[in-house]
Amino acid sequence: MSVPLTANQIQYFMGEALHEARKAALIGEVPIGAVVVQNGQIISRAFNLREHLQDGSQHAEYQAILEANRLQHSWRLPEAQLFVTLEPCIMCAGLIQQTRITDVYYGADDAKGGGVTSMYELLTDERLNHQVNVHAGVRDQEASALLKTFFKDVRKRKKAAKKARQLADKKAGQNL
Ligand SMILES: [Zn+2]
């Protein structure tokens, strides 16, 4: 069993996951971050790196869990708590279930891909052999603000690039 966390610890650990998410945004990745906690300590942390590594398994929480497995020399993490800024997808929910993590704290809901509450409820499905305590909406406004700002910037950059291309085309046309 995992050691229960205080409200302050929950806020703090989600703050660390948000910090990981900001690192992703800095390098142009969708800002999602995660930390794994055991005995009141962060044992692993990761952020989304899917674009840089062109690897579909580079979700923040997936990589943080794998790192925890390596550090613990165990595929089981029954004393671990996962903090992730966005609701886990079905792939990550599968790994959480497989590794026997007891508690998942997440920030924003993912209406289009959530595997925990929004679309599927894999972590609390009683047909499976292991259920997870799900704590949704922890510092969710900060998590979704990060995502919103990121996608707004992406759209802005795309628009600017299009405009630059049109200008360049126009110039090239004039020089003919
Ligand atoms: Zn995922």
Image: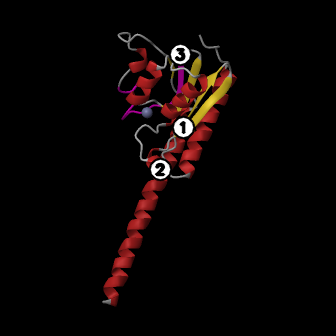
Location of mark 1 (residue): 143
Graded by Cα atoms within 10 Å as few (under 14), some (14 to 19) or many (20 or more), the crowding at tag 3 reads: many
User: Does 28 appear above or below 162?
Assistant: above
In the picture, measured across the screen, residue 83 lies left or right of residue 117, that is right
Q: Which residues are magenta?
A: 102-119
Residue type, label 1:
Ala
Graded by Cα atoms within 10 Å as few (under 14), some (14 to 19) or many (20 or more), the crowding at tag 1 reads: many
User: Does 53 appear above or below 109?
Assistant: below
In the image, residue 70 lies at what x, y percent? 56, 28
Residue at 54% of width from left, 52% of height from top? 27
In the image, residue 121 lies at what x, y percent? 38, 20
- Label 3, secondary structure: give it: loop
In the image, residue 149 lies at what x, y percent? 51, 49
In the image, residue 107 lies at what x, y percent? 53, 31
Residue type, label 2:
His
- Label 1, secondary structure: give it: helix
95 magenta-colored: no
Residue at 58% of width from left, 21% of height from top? 81
Q: Which residue of the protein is positioned furthest toward the front in this rendering?
A: 73
Q: Is mark 1 within 8 Å of ligand 1?
A: no
The C terminus - image quarter? bottom left
Per the model, the C-alpha gap separating discs 2 and 3 is 31 Å
Q: Is mark 3 within 8 Å of ligand 1?
A: no
User: Does 156 appear above or below 44?
Assistant: below
Per the model, the C-alpha gap separating discs 3 and 1 is 22 Å
Say whether residue 128 is visible: yes
Say whether residue 116 is visible: no
Location of mark 3 (residue): 102
Location of mark 2 (residue): 52
